[in-house]
Image (cartoon, helix red, strand yellow):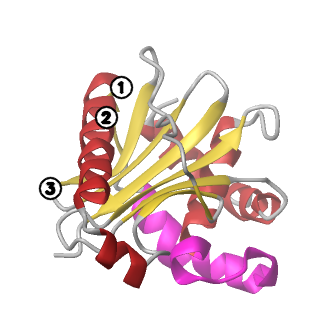
Amino acid sequence: MNAADLIELSNVEGFLNAALVQSSQIGVDILEFRTIDESWCSAVLFSCKKNVCVEKYVSFLALLNHELHFYQEWNISETSPSDLELIAKNWLMPEINNAVDIPASEAASQIGGITSSIRQCIEEVPNSVTLDHPDRWGVFLNGSRLLESHKVWLPSSNCNVIALSNEWNGMEFLYETPASFILFSWGTGA
């Protein structure tokens, strides 16, 4: 898997739309590290199990579609075929066409550092703040607050990582683990 292959395949007529149509039937787990801290904000990992969708590029496009719907707070089941064409043209293609490859070790270091810093921020915030904003501080899996620590889904050491964005204030990485395809998404509020 690499960025050039994803770009090429996404530009094949009909492939992107067909993958997006499939994406609404693909189950995705969402692991969120939430804060209202302007520097760290939140990090979100979207996961599609390989036994649910074995086609890597279809899984990646499904993850991107789920990410868009998650951030826009738009139910994916309400998306029409004409909406999918607009999503592909106006959001996915510009993002995919800027994709580059980065080493798994670099991505794992960045993901680990960000999620660790967010966890520390969550642990250090006074209880009064978390009581005022209980849905904004913590680690959540599929919308439910986790009371125990959850392992971050880091890239397999031998996989390539596709970076859709890799900036000081925002990152989006597509990669795989032994059991899942993952989209890591993070940005500051600054």
Mark 1 surroundings: few (<14), some (14-19) or many (≥20) residues within 10 A = many
Element marked by disc 1: helix
Res 7 label: none
The CA span between labels 3 and 2 is 13 Å
Quarter of the image for residue 88 reads: bottom right
Q: Position of residue 38 (x, y in %)?
A: 20, 73
Q: Residue furthest top?
A: 158
Which residues, given as a range, are shown in magenta?
69-96
Cβ–Cβ below 8 Å for labels 3 and 2?
Answer: no
Q: Amino acid at mark 2?
A: Ala
Q: Residues within 10 Å of mark 2 (few under 14, many from 20)?
A: many
**Does 72 appear above or below 4?**
below
> Disc 2 designates what residue?
107
Residue 4 x %, y % = 44, 39
- Amino acid marked by disc 1: Ala
* 104 relative to 72 in the view: left or right: left
Residue type of the residue flagged with mark 3: Trp
Residue appearing at x 85%, y 59% in the figure = 25
Nearest to the observer: residue 98 or residue 174:
174
Rendered position, 20 above or below 7: below
Q: Which residue is mark 3?
A: 168
- The reply to whether the C-beta atoms of the residues labelled 2 and 1 are less than 8 Å apart is yes
Residue 12 falls left or right of residue 155? right
Task: Answer whether residue 12 is visible to the viewer in this image.
Answer: no
Q: CA distance from mark 2 to mark 1?
A: 5 Å
Give the vertical position of 128 relative to 47 (above or below).
Answer: below
**Distance from the alpha carbon under mark 1 to that under mark 3:** 18 Å
Q: Is residue 79 above or below residue 130?
A: below
Task: Residue under label 1, please give it.
Answer: 104
